[in-house]
Image (cartoon, helix red, strand yellow):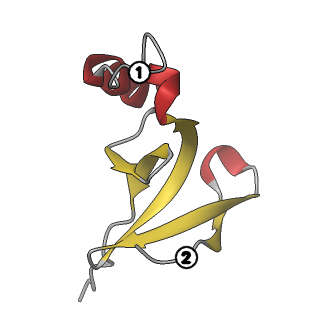
Amino acid sequence: MEEYTNAVNTRNKDITMKQVYKHNGNAYVILDKRTIRHFCESIADTPNMEYVQLYMKWQGADHVLRTESHFLFCETIQDAELVP
């Protein structure tokens, strides 16, 4: 996975800086990130992926990436199409 860079989000006419994450040739806008243990019931437990999916839908994300310590809730940046 590559380092973060900045992008401008103009949705809802507000201009805010968002992080872009490149992974496997795709680019994603990071909507939110949470520690993995945020989705665990105890420290020794594994994350409950059902909770991760529910949080992803609540955030409006279409993809989740996982680092060593965090889940990244992302929106995929689509490739531009040329219109003749």
The C terminus: image quadrant: bottom left
**Is 60 placed above or below 4 here?**
above
The residue tagged 1 is 44
C-alpha gap between disc 1 and disc 2: 29 Å
The residue tagged 2 is 3
Comes first in the chain, label 1 or label 2 = 2
Q: Secondary structure at mark 2?
A: loop
Query: Going by the image, does 71 lie left or right of 12?
Result: left
**Is 62 placed above or below 83 here?**
above
Query: Residue 15: percent from the left, percent from the top?
Result: 76, 57
Q: Give the residue at x 32% y 43%.
A: 62
Q: Give the residue at x 75% y 50%.
A: 14
**Is 23 placed above or below 46 here?**
below
Res 64 → quadrant: top left
Question: Amino acid type of disc 2?
Answer: Glu
**Is 43 placed above or below 83 here?**
above
Q: Secondary structure at mark 1?
A: loop
